[in-house]
Amino acid sequence: MKKSGNFSGEPGAIQLTARPQRSKWIMLGSLFAIGFGLLTLREGGAVLFVDGAARQAAGRYVPFVLWFNFLAGFAYIVAGAGLWMRWRWAAWLALAIAVATALVFLAFGVHVVRGGAWEQRTAVAMTVRTLAWTGIAAIAWRRPAAQARAAGTH
């Protein structure tokens, strides 16, 4: 028997469920994450793979921080796309990025205290990255929690 094209609830009719509306904060966070990821890949890739002006301008960069940030750029894009699509795992990925960034920032601090070469802009950039991903993760987790409360589940 062919399914009916209307949604009136008649036997055999297709039943669609409405997806919850995407929060403007989730939209902004996901677009920011994707843009930040693309920019991170471009800038980090220029320093890592092109022996030119970008590498000279980077000065005394810290290789493990640069490699982490470059590779994290891919995760930023994936997390941003997942947040845009409202996939639950994207909130977990945003949290993982925030924690990993904070841990690399801590390792960077140890590197500095032990007398390693560094640039002040690295400290500023890691502060921005840590705060940005903590904020994105908080937004991503706030939305599912609000939906669970509304549905009466936890």
Image: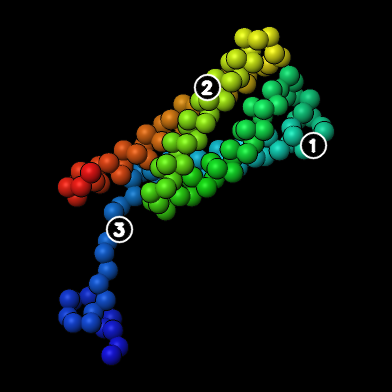
Q: Give whichever of discs 2 and 3 has the lower sequence position.
A: 3
Residue placed furthest toward the bottom: 1
* Label 1: which secondary element: loop
Residue 95, horizontal then vertical, whole percent: 43, 36
Above or below, 102 relative to 14: above
Q: Residue at x 38, y 49 (%)?
A: 88
Residue under pointer 2: 127
Q: Residue at x 73, y 19 (%)?
A: 60
Q: At label 3, which amino acid type do we have?
A: Arg
Residue 139, horizontal then vertical, whole percent: 36, 37
Which mark identifies residue 50?
A: 1
Left or right: where does residue 116 sit relative to residue 100? right
Discs 1, 3 touching: Cβ within 8 Å:
no
Q: At label 1, which amino acid type do we have?
A: Val
Q: At label 2, which amino acid type do we have?
A: Thr
Q: CA distance from mark 1 to mark 2?
A: 26 Å
Q: CA distance from mark 2 to mark 3?
A: 35 Å
Q: Give whichever of discs 1 and 3 has the lower sequence position.
A: 3
Q: Residues within 10 Å of mark 1 (few under 14, many from 20)?
A: few
Quadrant assignment for the N terminus? bottom left
Residue under pointer 3: 19
Q: Where on the picture, by quarter, is residue 144?
A: top left
Q: Residue at x 43, y 46 (%)?
A: 90
